Amino acid sequence: MTKNLQNSSKAASKTPAVTFRKKFIAFFLTLALACTGFAVAPATAFADDASGDDAVFVGEIRASEAKTDASKKNPLTSLGTSGAIEALSGTSVVKPLATVGTVTDLATAVINAPQNTPTTIQLTADIDLGAYYLPISKGQDITLTGAFKLKGSDVSVGNDYLGTVIWVDTGAKLTLSGITVINTSSKGAGVGVESGGTLTLKSGTISGCKDTGVFSFGNIAMTGGTITKCMSAYGGGGVVVAGGTFKMSGGKITENKSSVHGGGVYVSKGTFTMTGGTISKNKATKCGAGLVTFSTFKMSGGKIIENTASQDGGGAYVVKSGNMNITKGAVTDNVAKKFGGGVATEDYAKLKVAKKGKFSDNRAKGAYKRLAKYNKIYKKNIKSKKWSYNLKQGYNNFDIAGPYLGAKTTAKGKPSIKGASTIKLRKGYAKTSKVYVGKGYPAPKFSITKNTGSKKVTINSKGKLTIPKGLKKGNHKITIQAKNSSGVKTKTITIKVS
């Protein structure tokens, strides 16, 4: 049973915990009913639109499709009550800066943190909470700092605090600055935030969580730091916004996964505002790899880049109940295996892109023209002129896909090469490899056209350059080429062995 690291009385924490638990369960039951799969018409289901153009339907979230998932056993519905709560307490009064290196020291510092007074607690060693979790109570304003790990290694999801390593109560404030929060339990989140609670992530990392990095009914401010390598079977591998606000002005949400939708961020309720930072390299088995929104998403800066969805919405997916407004920022290098490489929306009226919104190098199953019936709403809502692969307008499927797309068209993009121009090695070096990124459409293939060093230096078609052990001292020049049907690009690399 998971134990409360702070309070010695079971009754002292049971009420808010049970409230949080009930809301958590209710949210996921709602999620299961709403978000269970996107029905995309097969290729044979093309139909003539009233405009006379060929049209293809881009699927949407349908409540009727929830029956199978809703009938499955939901592990969150088997949550037990609080059980016996133990505490590791102390009697000393905490100072404005407390240094802690053990579980006992941490419990003492948090228990004695005064109300309504900012208190910094600095970790001086890695701390494993084991079966405990750390609650930040109403009225407390605590900053956890130090370049060390706070780990939950046996935090069960079968408790009122839902397996979080840290739980932020209503009226409580927590700032993470430099520490790494890791949940290595088989299930559980990194940080949970109750309605009216506030989490600020300045620096450090939240990682390795099996049921979302951060799950919030309250408020999140992310100015730096990283949420990475977290996952979820329900949606929202990195962050779940179930109410309140999420303001992202910096940091990274990267390499998270969802077995359904929203690999990076899942916005169920509340508002997600992005003015900076990066949402990158997240994956979703279904849709919305970067993010999915049932509510409000506003983007005026930052990047949504290199996310991959197995179905629709590589960068983002906008449900009918949601809306997305991009005034500035970049949606680039995202991939949807079906529709909407950059963004897929169930209603074109719910997506707005201003002149400074940039789309580039997004990919999907094919490029399409805009249906004539969407000309009016396009001119009203889509102002950007920057689209992927020489496509002249945004409703092209590579960048934006809506309920219907028109006839197929051709996308073209000349190759480019990104990677180091100089590789420095010392004599006696081991076998080395470097990766070069080729952009363009179709995806370019790499080769070596000139080699003054060694024929054993090779590059594969995807851009991985391999340098064998044993090149002689000196400068060795290699010319690599990226080629597709739209053109050729070369780059000369110098390998310096000293």
Image: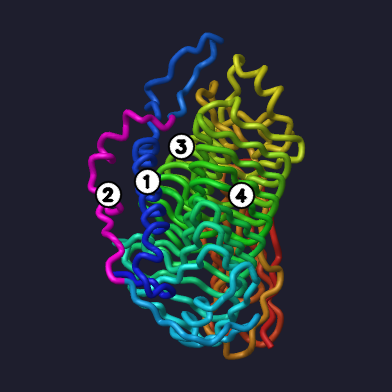
Q: Which one is closest to the eye, mark 3 or mark 4? A: 4
User: Is mark 2 in CB contact (under 8 Å) with mark 1?
Assistant: yes
For residue 491, which quarter of the picture?
A: bottom right
User: Is mark 2 in CB contact (under 8 Å) with mark 4?
Assistant: no
- In the structure shown, which secondary structural element does the residue marked by tag 4 occupy? strand
Residue named by callout 3: 338
Q: Which one is closest to the eye, mark 2 or mark 3? A: 2
Please name the amino acid that badge 3 sits on: Lys
| 429 shown above or below 330 | below
Please name the amino acid that badge 1 sits on: Phe
Residue named by callout 4: 304
User: Is mark 4 in CB contact (under 8 Å) with mark 1?
Assistant: no
Residue named by callout 2: 74
Q: Give x and y (percent) for residue 223.
A: 66, 61
Quarter the N terminus occupies: bottom left
Residue at image coords 54%, 59%: 254
Quarter the C terminus occupies: bottom right
Please name the amino acid that badge 4 sits on: Ile
Local crowd size for mark 2, using a 10 Å CA cut-off: few (<14), some (14–19), many (≥20): some
Q: Earlier in the sequence, mark 2 or mark 4?
A: 2
Q: Earlier in the sequence, mark 3 or mark 4?
A: 4
Compare residues 485 and 291 and report the one nearer the observer: 291
Q: Earlier in the sequence, mark 4 or mark 1?
A: 1
Q: Which one is closest to the eye, mark 2 or mark 4? A: 2
Residue at image coords 43%, 68%: 165
